[in-house]
Amino acid sequence: MSDERETMRRVRAPGRVNLIGDHTDYTGGLVLPFAIDRQTTIDYRPADGIRLRSVDEAEPVAFDHRQPPQPGTIDSWGRYVAAVVAELGPERGLDGVVETTIPIGSGLSSSAALEVAVAIALGFDGTPIELAELCRRAEHAATGVRTGIMDQLCIAAATEGHAALIDCHSLDITDVPLPPPSEVEFVVRFVAGRTLEGSEYDTRVAECAMAEELIGPLRLADLDAVAAIDGPVIRSRARHVVSENRRVRDYADALAAGDLATAGAIMVDGHRSLRDDYATSIPIMDAAVEELMATPGVLGARMTGGGFGGCVVAMSEPGTGLDGWPVVPVAGAGHVSET
């Protein structure tokens, strides 16, 4: 029998695209993402200490797993690795190679995929929810941005062929079947590079907290309560969140009914809300959505993810030939092979 340290293993963690429900997760609202067939992989052996090389980044990551450095002392991708190690406190390290087909800075959750992959490779033993919570804490430590749990939980728990309707308060997940590629295509188009660090993401989190001080949890609020907020900025932020939660349910219902035209219209409404009420879109993203919606065969389009750049996602009839990355829903993260 071979020594465990000589056995090479592979772990994969997919990226994700969000169909509807952006900037609702950190208020305990509803989201509807799916894991995509672009992924981060780590080929590794158990080892003393952390030694990781990246196919995509020049600098390797190396440190004692018993004394991980503070994320703020490491640049680039290594800070996510260090933050996961600090949260997990693994009994052993690993020696391996990281590779990804998720474009960095695209809004398709490359950092969350790396976090989840590292945790699994280091022997995380727990539920998908526990894995997502650990990796979300690592994301906060690595970036200082108070993101929600959507990315990590979708990546940890997705079901092949389905989107995940996640209640970000209870963390309940309902699998929503997506039409097969023979009936509808989902295409992601990269528009502009972005990072949430230095953006107004945390400002939006704070503005939602201000709204909740006035009318209570936004996940429970209605538009009448929102209309009573005096400040126009806080009112508009709350209006987006409350209406977006409704759009998530309506989109899932439209898919269940096979009403793709209504589902597409809901995507466009969501984009307009992010543009007008939440101010997380940018002109180049608005132009991309308008171009897509003027294309015959496109049913719906919107920005996806945290905003301030990144990607738009389109839902179209098969064979439309859109410029972008066609994506299909895959299963969540895990080990995939031994060699």
Image (spheres, rainbow, N blue to C red):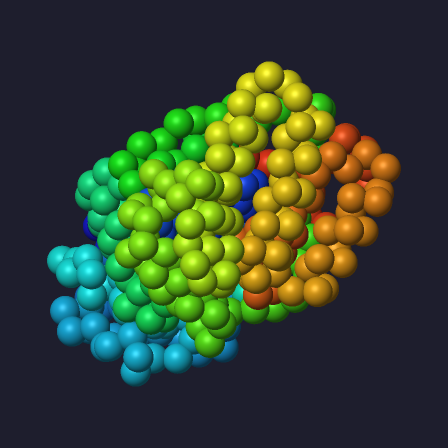
Q: Nearer the viewer, residue 57 or 1?
A: 57
**Identity of the residue furthest to the bottom in this view:** 73
User: Which x, y percent locates residue 257?
Assistant: 60, 17
Counting every numbered tag in the picture gives 0
Q: Residue at x 49, y 72 (%)?
A: 199
Quadrant of the image containing the N terminus: top left
Q: Is residue 212 left or right of residue 188?
A: left
Q: Nearer the viewer, residue 291 or 62?
A: 291
Q: Hey, which quadrant is residue 280 in on the image?
A: bottom right
User: Which x, y percent locates residue 127?
Assistant: 24, 38
Eyeballing the image, is 273 above or below 185? below
Query: Would residue 175 be seen by someone viewing this image from the given angle?
Result: yes
Q: Residue at x 62, y 49 (%)?
A: 271
User: Which x, y percent locates residue 63?
Assistant: 25, 75
Q: Is residue 58 left or right of residue 117?
A: right
Quadrant of the image containing the C terminus: top left
Q: Nearer the viewer, residue 201 or 15?
A: 201
Q: Is residue 216 left or right of residue 189?
A: left
User: Which x, y percent locates residue 321?
Assistant: 82, 41
**Identity of the residue furthest to the top in this view:** 257
Query: Would residue 111 be seen by someone viewing this image from the given angle?
Result: no
Q: Residue at x 71, y 24 (%)?
A: 182
Q: Nearer the viewer, residue 186 or 197?
A: 197
Q: Residue at x 27, y 36 (%)?
A: 170
